[in-house]
Amino acid sequence: MILENVVEVIVKTVHCRAEDVLPDTELRSLGIDSLKALTVLFELEEAFDIEIPNDLIPSIVTVNDIVVRLEGVQH
Amino acid sequence: MSRRVVITGLGVVSGFGLTTDDFWQGISHGRCAIKPLPQQDNLKISLGATLPEYDENELFSTEELPLLDRFSQLSILAAEQAATDAEFVSDEALQDAAVIIGNAAGSKNTDEEVYKKIHTSKNPRVHPLAIPKGMHSAVASSVSSRLGIHGPVFSVSSACASGAHAIIQGCMMIQQGLVDIALVGGTDAPFPYVLLKAWEAMRVVSDEVCRPFSKDRKGMSLGEGAGILVLESEEHANRRGARIYAELAGYSMSSDAGHITRPDVDSIAKAMRGALQNASVTAEDVDYVNAHGTGTLANDLAETQALHQVFAEHAEDIAVSSTKSMHGHTLGASSAMELVGTVLALHHNIIPPTVNFTEAGEGCDLDYVANEPRQQQVEVAMSNSFAFGGLNAVLVVKSYP
């Protein structure tokens, strides 16, 4: 469920194809630079109504890293 | 070192449409782009020269859009036209050029979105690109990115003289040999609700159309738009066989150092006199003055008095018009859009009129080219801009042989 939402936000933000966004996909390979990553995180905060702390951000490399962090933040 | 500077490209977006031709067809036929605004709660301002609707997704890429406040979108649309008009086709042609673009109001559209979110939402998060999207210089950096320009790029802000100050800055850079080409001008998109309320509070915006120099004038009409000109050293333009619209022959700037909004006749006369001197022309050489002509009681009288002071007996022979009566007061864009209008007047030998003119106001006794355009040879023309804060900038253009 969370994965679906993350994929949806990434597709909407960087205009890529949903089938290219897999759990192991590195964000960088989708053209997500640091500025775009901020936008993705902002959209996720909006979608889930949560705060993603700054110290979680450097460890996010793949799509799945986002999903795991979101699960952590939500619980 | 002082090199001659010529104008080789023009770009305008305005209430008349998204092209320079729309703008020229509008002002050279005496049409008025000031129209009813969508109704908003508690807002008395009901008219403005807004752009026709456009689909931003068609004109800008998905990469660009999150970074483009409306004032940057307008500057890009005008700059692209100007570059195309100057026939810069290769990617390398403009890489060392300067981009200097003025704006007065700033990114009020972005600011308004942010404030609305912060003050009305339960979890007030701000979009992470609000800063780069909203900075004043975004209007210049976005043009530099779109056109691949790597030279000196920045923005200037001096209220309603912003465009003219930007033009002068680019002209000086070319004169001094710092660059061969400069894209210069101004942009503004002043229709966010908060800004309209602030203008309303100043009681200088007319509740009907703008009637510069008329007895029954009731103030200015706001407009949105952008005007960008390609300036080029004469040598560079001739070497590449460019079409030259006119020479940017001179300029001058002054500051009233007095009242924040009331124009100072001596100070604006000083700027006009300085521009004539800088352009090496006499008062008698001037055929046309594109007036600041806001339609406020204070401006139009002070400007007329200053024209008398500078041009003496010749003042009565000069055609003076305010194109703001047609495209509205576009704040930081106005002086650049008006210079484009002035250059095209010289190029086509057609003087755009002052529309909505009824009967001359008290003390307004010059030839204001009332309501109808005029076919007339124009060799030398002046464009005036007098901003709040007492910041005056005057430009002089000459026909190029």
Image (cartoon, coloured by chain):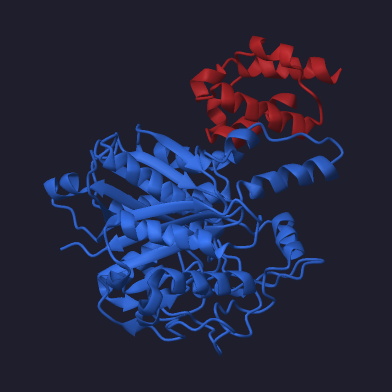
Chain colours: A red, B blue
Q: Residue furthest top?
A: A59
Task: Tell me which corner region of the image, top left, top right, bottom left or bottom right, holds residue A47.
Answer: top right
Residue B255, image x, y percentages: 54, 51
In x, y percent, where is residue B26?
A: 42, 75
Answer left or right for A33 relative to B314.
right
Is B298 located above or below residue B107 in the figure?
below
Q: Is residue B74 visible?
A: no
Q: Residue at x 37, y 65 (%)?
A: B382
Q: Residue at x 41, y 86 (%)?
A: B372
Q: Quadrant of the C terminus of chain B?
A: bottom left
Q: Position of residue B65 (x, y in %)?
A: 54, 43
| Left or right side of B115 for B216 | left
Quadrant of image for the N terminus of chain B? top left
Query: In front: B243, or B310?
Result: B310
Residue lying at the far bottom of the rendered structure: B359
Q: Where residue B193 sits in the image (x, y, percent)? A: 72, 58
Which quadrant of the structure image shows residue B260? bottom right
Q: Does B257 sit left or right of B148 as displayed?
A: right
| Residue drawn at 79 percent across, 30 percent down | A48
Could you say which is closer to the camera, residue B292 or residue B188?
B292
Left or right, B352 with respect to B243, comes to right
User: Count of labels shown?
Assistant: 0
User: Residue B248's image quarter?
Assistant: bottom left
Q: Is residue B96 above or below residue B80?
A: above
- Residue B177 visible: yes
Question: Which residue is nearer to you in this view: B117 or B360?
Answer: B360
